[in-house]
Every structure is written in C-alpha cells, then in structure tokens.
Amino acid sequence: MSITGNGFDPPANASLYSIISDAARSHPLRDSLGGAEGAPLTCLEFDTRVRAVASALLGHGVAAGDRVVVLGRTGLEWALLDCAVLAVGAVVVPVYPTSSAAQIEHMLRDSGSTYFAAETAEDATRLKEAGADAVWSFDDIAVWSQGGVSPALDERTAQVCADDLAMIVYTSGTTGLSKGCMITHRNMYVSSANTVRQTGGLFEGVTALALPLSHVFGQTMLFACLAGGASTVLLPGIPELVPALARVRPTFLALIPYALEKIRKHCRSMLTEEGERQAVVNGLRALAAGETLAADHPVGAALGGNLRYVISGGASLDESTAGFYAGFGVTILNCYGLTEAATAVTVSAPETNRVGTVGRPIPGTAVAIADADGEVLVRGPHVSPGYWGAAADNRPVDADGWLHTGDIGELDDGHLRITGRKKEILVTSGGKNVAPTPLEDRVRLHPLVSNCMVVGEGRSFVTALVTLDAVQAEKWRSEHPGDDPATAIQSAVDEANSLVSRAESIREFAIVAGDFTSANGLLTSSLKLRRAAIAETYSADIDQLYMSRG
C-alpha cells in the first residue's frame, strides 16, 4: 500500500464556495477566471458575480438540495452558474453537450432535477424534449451576474456543509445506462486542494481550461485553479484552445491524451518526419535524465512559448507523445483517477515525475493493489459516498472502505503504474492476455488515423478496426492517386506491434467506413471506446478479418 502525507481535509462547515470567498478576502486583486475574450476577472470580481448569480437562483426559488441540470460547453457562464448553485446548497447535474436524447432523458428522470440551464437554444430544446420545463440560457446567467446581491444569501451560504451533496455526475459507462455518482463538497474540495498541494507551485501560473465542465476531471481542475490561484481562461474545447495558446501563453495545461494527440498532429506541419522522430528521441532522453530542453522552436511558440507542464488524465498516454512534448520543453505529468474519487487519486509532481507511471497518491490518499488480481484499490476522504437514483443499491466501496477501481496496476516505489483494465483485457483462444490500449494508442498517432479498436477476445489472434481522419485521408489520396491508404496504415500497425510479443501483435486490420463518435454511440461522452457497440456495428468487418486467415 502507498499513502502520501497528511492531506488537506476541509472543516465540517466548509463548502466549495468557501474557496471562492476566501480568495476574494485574501487576494482580491489577483487574477482568477475569465472567458474566451478579455482578461480574467479578479478574485473579488469573480466572487461578486457568483454572489449575484446565487442571489438570482434564490429569487427563482432554488432550495438547498434541488438538482440543477447544466448542458453546455465550458465557459465563464458555466463556471459562474456552477459555483452559484453550490453556494446556495443546491446540486449540480452536469450533462455533456454530446449526450444522446435517451441519455439526457435518463439523467433528468433519474436525478429528479427541477431546474435547467443550457448554452444554446438547440441545447434548451433537447432538454425540453427530455422533460425539462423552463430552461435558463447562458445569456440569462451573464445578465444575472451583473445584478445585485440578496440579503438572504449569506445565511444560505453559511448553511452549506462539507458533507452536503454538491454534484451528481453521470458516469459515461461503456455499457448500459450511466450511474449517477454522488460527489460531496468535501470530495471535490479534497481532490482539488490536494492536487494543488501535490504539484507545488504549478497552479500559481497561467492556464487555459478547455476540459468539459460536464466531466469530473474538468470540475476538479476548475476548483484546483480557484484554490491554487491560477489565472485561468475558460475555453469551449480543443478546437478553440489551439489558436488561443499564443494569446494566453499558459505556463501549464490540463488535458486528456486525445487532446495531446490532436495538438501533436497539428504541430506536424512545422516539422519534417525526421524532425518529429528526433524530437521524441531527445525528449525521452531528457525525461530519463530529469532535464528540461529549450523551447525555442516554432512548435514551442505554437504552444504559447511559456508552456512547461501538462497534467494529463482520463486515459493512457503513448510514451512517444510524452517524448514529443518533452522535446520542446514541455513535461507531461500523468495523473490517474475516476469519477468515484472526484478524479484525483494520483498525480505526477514536477520534482518527482517518473515516465511510465501516473504519479504518487495525492496527500491523504491510500492506494493498494489487490493480491488476487492486481486491481487498484483507493481509500480517502475524496471517495464518493455512493450512487444516486436507480443505481443507489450499488456500493462503490467494500466493507473495509476500499474503492475498487476496475483498473489493474502495480506500485513502484510509491508510484502507480496502470497496466490494464479488468474488463478490457482480451483473452485469445490460446489463453494469451492482451492489453489493447497501448496498441490502440500507438496506431492512433498516425496522421491518417482517427481511431482504432483492437479485437481478439476468444479469437485465435489479434486484429484491429481502423477509422480514417476524413480531412487527412482526402489530402493523402490527392497526393497518392491510386494507392491504398492501408499501405500507409501498415507502418503504424508495425510500430504498435513493436511494443508487444508476437502473440499480442495485430495480425490483420481493416479500415472501416465512418468513424467512432459519441454522436453515433460508439464513444462515451469522455471519448472512451464503447467496445461492444463497435463490435456489433462492424461485426461483418470483424468476421471478414478472421475469414481471411481461415
């Protein structure tokens, strides 16, 4: 078992809003949060706007414990409403903009929400079709934020406690209906504050937050930025982040591996193939030696010029991507967590970063490895008290208080290494265990590839389904008339196979029509593969792969 130090645990009368109000009193003129345009608000200005929105909520009859659905992309209005709902003791129910009609209907019905907010008119229509009554717009929130403060607000905020319910976050499960995970003020406070403590002065810098606030990772990073004092620009997503980097000039970012891969592909236009390969080699060498390379290169400038660290979580990260960024002076700090632990379980720190691991437990968190099957177990004050609604009978922890994560891992001198997921390990008919994620990560790095899923459960060998990036594929075909893109993809498959034994390697692959997206139900809202749905959709392609070898 590994446990890191004594973590910060808020007093019983503390709420997430106290992070904001404390900053307004202690650092009134320090930069805090801002939208895509203009400078960030100061801590005092942000607190004033939160209080105004909270007062408007009281005026609309929002009571403590009421559930408030929010559907939209990350932005200042989302954050203001988020913090205001929590300030009055109500409960945030975040919904992904990419959620299907059936998913939205399930979340509204299961949560019993009575108040609703949406970014766009289209989003509002989707909520109404799922059963919502009146829906506030983000424009309404912007207007409310300029209003006055209710005399009743202070009494209400003082009644909110650390163990009160703050959020119901619906997990984007790869199968079945999502479960509403209950997150208390204490859970989120502990997760965010101890992430700040783990990473030293990292959160005293400048950042752009483009993670979805509909995901618990985005929420944790939002409150970590508020607690740590970061000057933060809120952006709707990765397409808006890339062009904003030169203006914002962040010192650190929080991203998921998918975003890091997209930004890496964007930077390829500034490099030759050999230049990219050399950057990876140089970067991995620097990481191994604990060194930081200079960032005086067009790629470094494209990343803003000041970027030094990226906290990466949500999925595995291919080692070559870590090397690529290190080649331009940017260190990837891998982290690990899950919704049931308010995101943060382990975080890599700048001083103790170790390649190939996801860091050490944040302060106050215990991590153990189950003897029977190597499952990662977690215990701490940030672990969820349970599930809401239809999933309430499911217990996230065992009788000894351990959260069973479903991930397989090992501890190396206190550093956690994730080696697979219990439900995603493929077992071939020959009895070989295959971890598909490292293979998929490596294939997906090819410029032509949009996504990849490895197949092999109960089969005699391993195969893969590959989808193409439509824009890159069109460009490639114009430059290679008459050629089959499979010849180019083969190099990516060969590179992936170099990571594993022959028994684990991809023997055949098929380029399939369309793509895996959350809109068509083949990815979760957090961009994880829905393996069963993909296998069913492309069952004929899979059958053909195995027929080709008899």
Image (tube, rainbow, N blue to C red):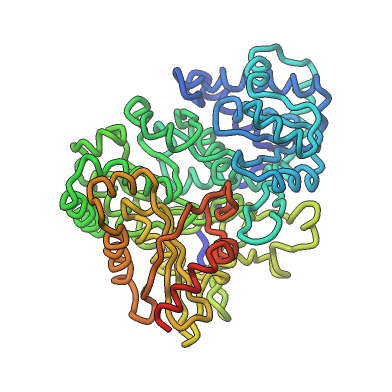
Q: Residue at x 65, y 48 (%)?
A: 187
Above or below, comparing residue 530 to residue 168 in the picture: below
Q: Residue at x 77, y 42 (%)?
A: 108
- Residue 521 picture location, percent across and down: 60, 53
- Residue 279 picture location, percent across and down: 20, 51
Q: Quadrant of residue 399?
A: bottom right
Q: Quadrant of residue 213?
A: top right
Left/right placement of residue 185 relative to residue 488 reads right
In this rendering, does residue 162 appear at all?
A: yes
Left/right placement of residue 312 relative to residue 325 reads right
Residue furthest to the front: 482
In this rendering, does residue 417 appear at all?
A: no
Above or below, comparing residue 415 to residue 260 in the picture: below
Identify which residue, 6 or 71, lies in the foreground: 71
Above or below, comparing residue 42 to residue 314 in the picture: above
Q: Residue at x 61, y 29 (%)?
A: 78
Left/right placement of residue 4 relative to residue 168 reads left
- Residue 385 picture location, percent across and down: 73, 55
Left/right placement of residue 135 relative to residue 471 reads right
State which quarter of the image contains the C terminus: bottom left
Q: How many discs mark residues in the rendered view? A: 0
- Residue 422 picture location, percent across and down: 56, 71
